[in-house]
């Protein structure tokens, strides 16, 4: 089964899926990269030794080979790239293609009324609504955006990013967590506005005032770091909060493994949020804003984590405090979170479902799983509010 995944560049969140596909298909799998990674991404730790990825082909080095691979493939997964000219001829010819996309109207669905924008969406998406072209939705609100323009009717499937999976002895993992007598909270992200790094600091101040025994592991750096450190100092939280700055991905996972609750405070601009996958894989009970892309796909509220829909600090604080009032539920949900990633939301399972989808399609049927990658993506709408002149 000749399969090609094409995108602007390969990254850490795509490699596990591609590795799994390559393990199953061997030299019949290729990932086509259409541009060099930006310097900003490289300085953030995304740089890869591209020469050590056996299935990677770069269109800016071997364009004719890439065109041939795409044209002859049995299945193509086409992610975001400006080089749509490489795969649109395939879609026009009626060959099976899976578009891979996050939200297209993340900053507001009102943008769907733009005539210029609609023309571009027609050329790339809408005109293929009756062709064998499906949409893999990275995030729970992607289907809503594409439904708004009438693209991919009945052909939108759940997908996501799949960070490396760590397999644990479940009892040993949770024994390590129970050995921590103090409640361990973890937050990890870039310190930028959409991530709301001020939320966990404000919560820590309230938990300290309430006399709760806790420690917050605060991981990440960015433009808001000086302000956040000032807030921590002014609230007298130096003993309750450890600031790590940027850590390598494996170091972040090490912190998560000893953590009990992971706080994910990004707003609706977070298309996915792979750190949720990582925290759940580490057995953390995740508390996440329901408007972020990964949360509705990965978290079953009250079963393997908790979410809030209010989109502001009060919603976050209310759900987390309610969770901390029932500490016995934290381990139960953490175990369920680990099992969710182990059994369903991991790269190997997604790759198997991808191959199963193709084999069923080839036989003339579309037999989708009930949940997880390649299951039907429902049309969900995020709640929006207007705050200080901004859509939030």
Image (cartoon, grey):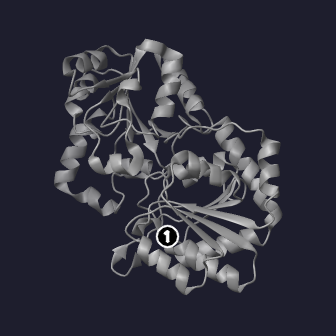
Residue 385 visible to an observer of this rendering:
no
Q: Position of residue 264 (x, y in %)?
A: 56, 62
Give the x, y percent position of residue 242: 60, 68
Q: How many marks?
A: 1
Residue 69 placed where, x, y %?
Answer: 30, 16
The answer to whether 195 appears left or right of 372 in the picture is left
Residue 260 falls left or right of residue 112: right
Q: Up-down: is 160 above or below 177?
A: above
Please name the residue that numbered disc 1 is placed on.
197
Q: Secondary structure at mark 1?
A: loop
Judged left or right of residue 225, residue 91 is left
- Where residue 243 sits: x, y (%)? 55, 67
Image-based side of 358 in relation to 79, left or right: right
Q: Residue at x 47, y 70 (%)?
A: 196
Vertically, is 278 above or below 361?
below
> Within 10 Å of the Cα at label 1, are there few (<14), some (14-19), or many (20+) other Cα atoms?
many
Q: Quadrant of residue 135?
A: top left
- Residue 361 appears in view: yes
Please identify the quadrant where the N terminus is shown: top left
């Amino acid at each position: 089964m000749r399969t090609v995944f094409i995108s602007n560049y390969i990254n850490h969140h795509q490699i596990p899926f591609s590795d799994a596909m390559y393990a199953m298909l061997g030299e019949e799998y290729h990932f086509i990269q259409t541009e060099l990674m930006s310097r900003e991404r490289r300085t953030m730790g995304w740089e890869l030794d591209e020469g050590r990825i056996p299935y990677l082909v770069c269109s800016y080095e071997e364009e004719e080979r890439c065109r041939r691979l795409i044209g002859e493939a049995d299945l193509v997964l086409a992610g975001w790239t400006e080089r749509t000219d490489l795969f649109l001829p395939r879609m026009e010819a009626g060959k099976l293609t899976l578009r891979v996309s996050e939200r297209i109207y993340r900053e507001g669905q009102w943008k769907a009324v733009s005539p210029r924008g609609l023309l571009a969406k027609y050329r790339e998406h809408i005109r293929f609504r009756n062709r064998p072209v499906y949409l893999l939705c990275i995030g729970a609100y992607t289907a809503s955006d594409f439904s708004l323009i009438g693209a991919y009717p009945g052909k939108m499937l759940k997908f996501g990013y799949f960070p490396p999976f760590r397999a644990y002895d479940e009892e040993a993992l949770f024994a390590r967590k129970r050995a921590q007598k103090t409640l361990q909270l973890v937050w990890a992200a870039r310190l930028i506005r959409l991530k709301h790094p001020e939320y966990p600091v404000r919560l820590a101040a309230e938990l300290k005032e309430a006399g709760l025994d806790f420690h917050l592991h605060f991981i990440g750096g960015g433009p808001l770091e000086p302000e956040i450190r000032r807030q921590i100092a002014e609230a007298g939280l130096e003993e309750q909060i450890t600031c790590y700055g940027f850590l390598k991905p494996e170091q972040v996972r090490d912190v998560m493994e000893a953590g009990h609750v992971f706080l994910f405070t990004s707003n609706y601009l977070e298309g996915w949020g792979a750190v949720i996958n990582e925290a759940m894989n580490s057995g953390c009970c995740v508390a996440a804003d329901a408007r972020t892309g990964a949360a509705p796909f990965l978290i079953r509220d009250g079963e393997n984590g908790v979410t809030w829909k209010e989109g502001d600090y009060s919603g976050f604080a209310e759900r987390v405090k309610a969770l901390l009032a029932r500490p016995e539920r934290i381990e139960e949900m953490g175990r369920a979170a680990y099992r969710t990633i182990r059994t369903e939301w991991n790269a190997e399972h997604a790759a198997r479902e991808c191959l199963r989808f193709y084999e069923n399609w080839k036989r003339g049927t579309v037999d989708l799983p009930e949940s997880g990658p390649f299951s039907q993506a429902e049309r969900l709408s995020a709640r929006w509010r207007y705050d200080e002149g901004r859509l939030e």
